[in-house]
Amino acid sequence: MVDLEKLRTVAKETVSRDDVKYLIGWRQGTYGFRVSPHFMKEPEEAEKLIFSPLCSNNLATYLTSAEKLPVPRGEEPDTRKVALMVKGCDSRAVVQQIVEQGIKREDVIIIGCPCDGVVDLNKVKEKFPNVSELVQARWNNGSIIFQLPQGEEEVPREDVLADKCLTCCYPNPVEADVMLWEEVKTRGSDEFADVKEMEAKSIQEKQSYWQDKFSTCIRCYSCRNVCPMCYCEDCILDRLNPNWIFRSVNASENMAFHLTRAFHLAGRCIECGECERVCPVDIPLMKLNRKLYKETKEIFAYEPGLDLESKPLLASYRPDDQEDFIL
Amino acid sequence: MSEQFKPNIVAFLCNWCSYAGADLAGTSRIQYPANIHVIRVMCTGRINPLFVVNAFQQGADGVLVSGCHPGDCHYMEGNFFARRRFTMMRKLLEYVGVEPERFHMSWVSASEGAKWKDVVEEVVESAQKVGPFDQFRRNKINW
């Protein structure tokens, strides 16, 4: 399925176009199972690009995080497009950004890479500890083959894939200008088992569970920085006047931070799982996000990032919305 | 506790309906619990869910958000947005272990002084039932 030749040819052609600023793709990292994002400006760099089960980064983040420098007097602003390689979940992030008018559809070229699930580095490292040489990986019909220094190892996908990929319902990009290879079949179905398990607990159990998790938070804001949907130029966490959430790291502020972060993604989170992946203290942030995802799906029959014509959930309403909790 | 617990309730009222409704309750001399601290806002659609979180941090045991009935909003659609927003917020608060009895939303129009009394009584009662809420307090800083 993965056709690296095709990927590189398309990348070369795209970057050679006059109206393209650069292409964002994945390249081999520097050690172990690492993969880095690659900003490709010259066609010669095409050989660096890869696509494998290790490409877990969501590159849609970089669409909105590019610095917008003031245009010098007498110069025209750079209106060239950005080309972007997307997996299924990444494409939903792009669509949701377009729906929210964070970016314009005509400003991006979406190169779709149907994806059979990416690995969770923690699970892989547990299986193959202390690997410092570069490792490559590829999909093989329900399993993943790692090219380790000692030889090839085949591992069933359930053992190493990230949790979000095991329940993924949209492995194929929902919007793409170029689709690189044939679509993969959807293997997962989302029953929200983890959320339901959490909901079944008593209030006291929930409280102690989350206080325990939030107490480890060091407020590095990685989850915010990596999130493709967190692209406000003036983030409420950085604002000093009014200062809604203090910077001190304590139970109250951590709780306020996590509630705010989760709420700001209500009806917007596209379940790419990046926040959880980058969290240095392994807070199960997706459990929070998925709770809100589940509620939007159940109450409003809304799923973000699927339809370019849809409206953002909290910026629209229906007169007959549910109101059973209102006195 | 020998004495009954007196909860702190913060109420965000919309200027056009609920605030006038509470005013009517006052001028009509309707007796209702005095635990409620009213903050007037121009519309329920103006209330950021962060206000609710912040109220809990600063000492509220319960929060009430009250506005015009759907369709009666002075700004045409503010309360429809607020309704969606707080549906989500309520689910989230419950999920992280804040009792659902601590957060309420109501529609009280300018002519419903009596309904305002009922709403306040229910909010205070349910906050009394779950007791003081101090897991989430912003601690005073002791240098």
Image (tube, coloured by chain):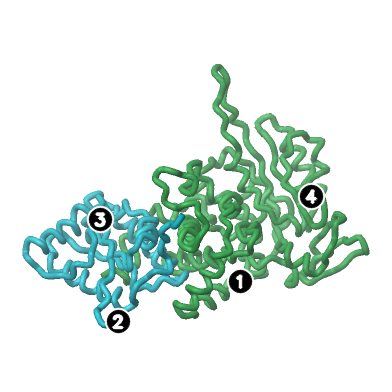
Label 3 chain ID: B
> Which mark sits nearer the N-terminus, 3 or 2?
2
Q: Tag 3's secondary structure?
A: strand
Q: Given the image, on which type of amino acid does mark 2 rest?
A: Met
Assess disc 3: are there few (<14), some (14-19) or many (≥20) residues with their C-alpha within 10 Å of its C-alpha.
few
Pointers 1 and 2 within a single chain: no
Distance Cα–Cα, label 3 vs label 2: 30 Å
Which chain is tinted cyan?
Answer: B
Question: In this structure image, what is the colour of chain A?
Answer: green
Q: Tag 4's secondary structure?
A: loop
> Which mark sits nearer the N-terminus, 4 or 1?
4
Residue B100 in the image: x percent, y percent? 37, 72
Q: Residue at x 29, y 57 (%)?
A: B79
Residue A35 in the image: x percent, y percent? 76, 52
Comparing labels 4 and 1, the label whose residue is closer to the camera: 4
Distance Cα–Cα, label 1 vs label 3: 45 Å
Q: Residue at x 49, y 78 (%)?
A: A205
Dot 3 corresponds to which residue? Answer: B39
Q: Given the image, on which type of amino acid does mark 1 rest?
A: Ser
